[in-house]
Amino acid sequence: MEVLNLVSIQNTTPMKFLDRLSKVAEIVGSLGIVISLFLVSVQYENNSLALKTSTANSVNANIADWYNSFFENTEETESFLTFLADPESVSQTEKFQAIMRLHSLNLHLQNALYLERQGVLDENLRKTISMAVYSGLQQPGFYYWWNQRKSMYTQDWQNFVEEIIASEEETELEELFNVFTKEENSKEGQNKSSQ
């Protein structure tokens, strides 16, 4: 009998050992998954920051390129400034060029606003965007262009520009920015509560 008991102990001992070994392997595997998830979250955070930085640089470079390429040509600059002051005083070709220049700039600005509202760009970039639009308000050419081209932009950009146009002349840019930020936050709150 003792021989039978010894045999059964020897037969079960490896099974218990394998059972314990599989439980240890499960714990190590679970720990590996937790560590992997942690590392993925760290990498995601770093990639997210890199993406935001790259996007901000790209937006700034596009707008800077627009200014640089345009203002390097004195003749085009003079024609553009003449268009802004009096759109009817320039030739059809110069008028078309000025409209396309403004259209191109506003596509860049519209994109920047979209990215800011998606959380990719810092909301302070809106100050720069507002200033670019706000600086043209005293110019008849700005309204000439806007009335011709506004339907070609997103509704969000149209609303943004229309709010700037509707603002009072004496409004400080910082105050204007704060109004837009509060309005946007209010709209987002209403959208979330209606869902």
Image: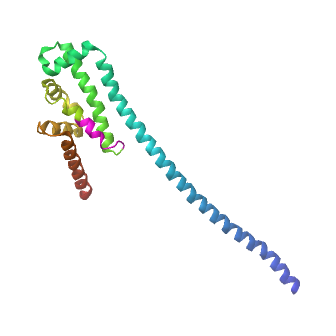
User: Which of 160 and 169 lies nearest the eye of the viewer?
Assistant: 169
Write down the quadrant of residue 122 in the picture. top left
Q: Position of residue 104 (x, y in %)?
A: 28, 26
Residue 195 visible in the current orientation: no
Residue situated furthest bottom in the rendering:
1
Q: Which residue is drawn at 81% across and 79% down?
A: 9
Write down the quadrant of residue 148 in the picture. top left
**17 vs 194: above or below:** below
- Left or right: residue 40 versus residue 98 is right
Q: Which residue is drawn at 19% across and 17% down?
A: 95
Q: Position of residue 6 (x, y in %)?
A: 85, 81
User: Which of 38 and 169 lies nearest the eye of the viewer?
Assistant: 169
**7 vs 64: above or below:** below
Q: Position of residue 27 (x, y in %)?
A: 63, 65
Q: Residue at x 88, y 83 (%)?
A: 3
Q: Quadrant of the N terminus?
A: bottom right
- Left or right: residue 147 versus residue 27 is left
Residue 12 visible in the current orientation: yes
Q: Where is residue 87 in the image (x, y as percent from the top left)?
A: 14, 19
Magenta includes 128? yes
Q: Residue at x 23, y 31 (%)?
A: 152
Magenta includes 63? no
The boundaries of the magenta stretch are 120-130
Write down the quadrant of residue 139 in the picture. top left
Q: Identify the colour scheme used.
A: rainbow
- Left or right: residue 45 versus residue 190 is right
